[in-house]
Image (cartoon, coloured by chain):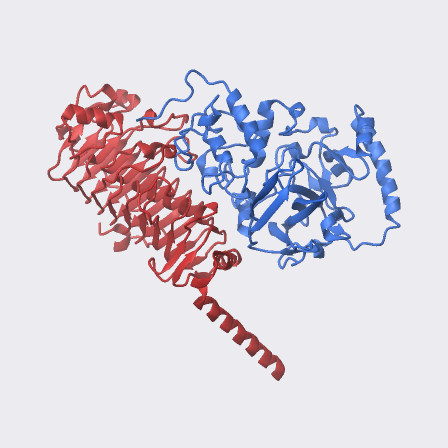
Chain colours: A blue, B red
Amino acid sequence: MVETLNAALKGRSFTGWLRRCAMLVALAAFFGCVRPAQSPVQSFVAEPFPQKLSDWHLFSGRGDALEPNQRVLPYDLNTPLFSDYAAKHRFVWMPPGTTAQYRPDQVFDFPVGTILVKSFGFPAGGGKERLIETRLLVHGKDGWVGLAYVWNHKQTEATLDLVPDPVAVRYTDAAGGQHAFTYYIPNANECKQCHENSRVMLPIGPKARNLNKDYAYADCVANQLARWTQAGYLQGAPQSPQLAPRAAQWDAPQSGTLEDRARAYLDNNCAHCHQPGATAGYTGFDLRLTTQGPAALGVCRSPNSAGRVGTLIYDLVPGKPEESILVARMESTRPKEMMPQIGRSVVHEEGVALVREWVRSLPSEGAGCAAGAH
Amino acid sequence: MKTRKTRTFLAGWIALCGSVALLAGCSQQSPENFQKQLQEQLIKAKAGDVIEVPEGKFHLDRTLSLTADKVTIRGKGMDKSILSFAGQKEGGSGLLVKANDFVIEDVAIEDTAGDGLTIQGGNNITVRRVRVEWTRGPNPLNGPYAIYPAECKNVLVEESVAKGASDAGIYIGQSDNVVMRRNRAEYNVDGYEVENSQHVDVYDNIATHNTGGLGVFNLPNLPKQGGKFVRVFHNQIYDNNTANFAPQSLGAIYHLPAGTGMYVMAINNVEVFNNKIHDNNTTNIYVIEYNPSLGEVKDARYRPFTEQVYLHDNEITGGGKSPDVRLDDVKALSAALGGPLPDVLYDGVIDPQIRAAKKGANPAQICIANNGTFTFLNFDGGNGFKHPVSDLKTYQCSLPKLEAVVIPQLPAGSAAQTGGQ
């Protein structure tokens, strides 16, 4: 169905899409009427937050099916944060009558009461998935709050846990590969480690450049910015998504150059800490997509107080991924040495390969970086 | 009514029993349990809370973190309440603090995978009688920093102990208004480091058996530049001759020669007085510019020159007996001088703009006075040792004394605050 629609819609204008989508939405709403009544989403904007995920009424039916309740909108990102190959399911909900304000370069300005939902799961055999955790980022009345709900074994309910225990994960991937490792669910402070800048907690993913892509909704395929606008969740976005920034999809070569994709990857996997005001701001190593200039990107720059991997000297040596601390720390799984420092237990082989390829493609002027003293 | 009272009483009694059992049983707990409880306390902490660490050695395997303001973590003593991170599985630090008005005292942090106690971006930070140590002794796999406040304001680190750090034992970086006093640093690569920081008093400390005792310097490519106004006084800096065990990737520190008592690099307005600095085998005091061979400078704000350094009333003896020649300059100098080096080494490198603008033989204002008997050499590092100067006459000048650092933790004008000055 989705593919057919996709094919049918190829080459059409956004307005054409929207018209068709609107029709489908209307139909869906009509049929929705005959479904049993579902109590609406409950938003909690201050402590105490509910102990059970089901108390938020974000999903209908059995919890782990993640069937979104009315007005709970699924979304996806062009280039996401890698989390141990977990499948991620994202949803957004805003209180009726409220809307987020579009901002071109930063995370949208979301209204109080907004809930951003992200569930993490691994294959459980037979095409099923075992959910590990569902994280809520809630825009409370005193700012954003991160909450981790941990799923029970029966997959019937997830419970709020401030300091979740590590989880043993074993699964077989689609290619038959066996995986076994310890998965760390972040505690409440660790949420802040990535989400805080200058001690203000903020979402990371939902920026225009990350959301500006098509999504296969239940009724049709649509651009997410357009759909959010249509749903009343976004105002101030450009008329056409083509006028909004769009980050490359790290694993889709047609979406951007090697540099575009590598920088998008670093933007979403590193820059939440590696930017001024954030956890690694003091290092001066700034990996945001918008960063210009070789020094901030680590070219021939010694990490001084920070980095550590074997005998490597510079964050990034153009043309030489094997001499670049940036690559080595992504390839490591040892605490302190590895990057990111939290939220990853296994190496993202494909992500590392992309960054390695990008570093190799950078022109090395002469002999590369000057050698250290000896 | 009666029933309700009884119930409350019972509940209280059960809670009490529970907590007693908890304390008594702590050392038998699995890492997960102790860690979980302590981390939960840290997450739930409110302003004014004191979080007690009981007596015992507790094993943890993930970074602990605190983000709540006005919280105190208090143990029963740096040899009694021990947080051991041996075999740490996750996280870059032992304890990571991003909070204001933080106090930690009478606790030990051992064998973390990365840094020991990391404090980022906090105002009014007190570290008192805390020991951070890698118990296997010097080893390149030890974490870089033991006590590691960065981007902080109003910091007091006192009566603490740091051992085994593969970069610096007690470090202060990109911070303002700092007092480090009465500490002991040994078997680190650098005992103490004052990096890119302003208004720092370092006094009554001991630095021994490190690779280098104390460094006061600015490095390029860091967000905060222009560290200055550093006073170093009443310290004992001796026998810092441990072979450098920093991994190469740590940058400049990898190049620090064993036997460096203290070094002053790429900074101005530093006053060093009333210290006892002796028996450091490369040199007792090393005053130098930042040499680009330590790593490229890609920072337009950075000045590599060292100026307005006032060394006075120190006891400086027995330095340079057997230099570590891992730095090219030191190697060449040692060869030229037939082995041993002087107590005080100055590279004599002067900013060309300052040289053009100011007259005299000492435009950088390096002043060395009343230090008793010791040996000195300006080795003319900028010109291939062409015009070395061993006569102190040019440098016998004085500079205005720097003002004492004032922090809220130490009331202005108290004897404690001035270190008896």
Say whether residue A333 is left or right of residue A372: right
Of the 4 image quadrants, the one containing the C terminus of chain A is top left
Q: Position of residue B412 (x, y in %)?
A: 31, 52
Q: Quadrant of residue B306?
A: top left
Say whether residue A102 is left or right of residue B243: right
Q: Position of residue A342 (x, y in %)?
A: 52, 44
The residue positioned 31% from the left and 46% from the top of the image is B137
> Eyeballing the image, is A67 above or below A101?
below
> Eyeballing the image, is A368 above or below B285?
above
Say whether residue B189 is left or right of residue A74: left
Say whether residue B153 is left or right of residue A16: left
Q: Position of residue A184 (x, y in %)?
A: 55, 48
Residue A40 appears anywhere in the view: yes
Count how many numbered circles sit on residues in the image: 0
Residue B122 appears anywhere in the view: no
Q: Quadrant of residue A368?
A: top left
The residue positioned 22% from the left and 52% from the top of the image is B420
Of the 4 image quadrants, the one containing the N terminus of chain A is top right
Hey, which residue is sitting farthest left in the picture?
B373
Closer-to-camera residue (B183/A103):
B183
Closer-to-camera residue (B61/A35):
B61
Hey, which residue is sitting farthest top in the picture?
A366
Q: Position of residue A160 (x, y in %)?
A: 62, 56
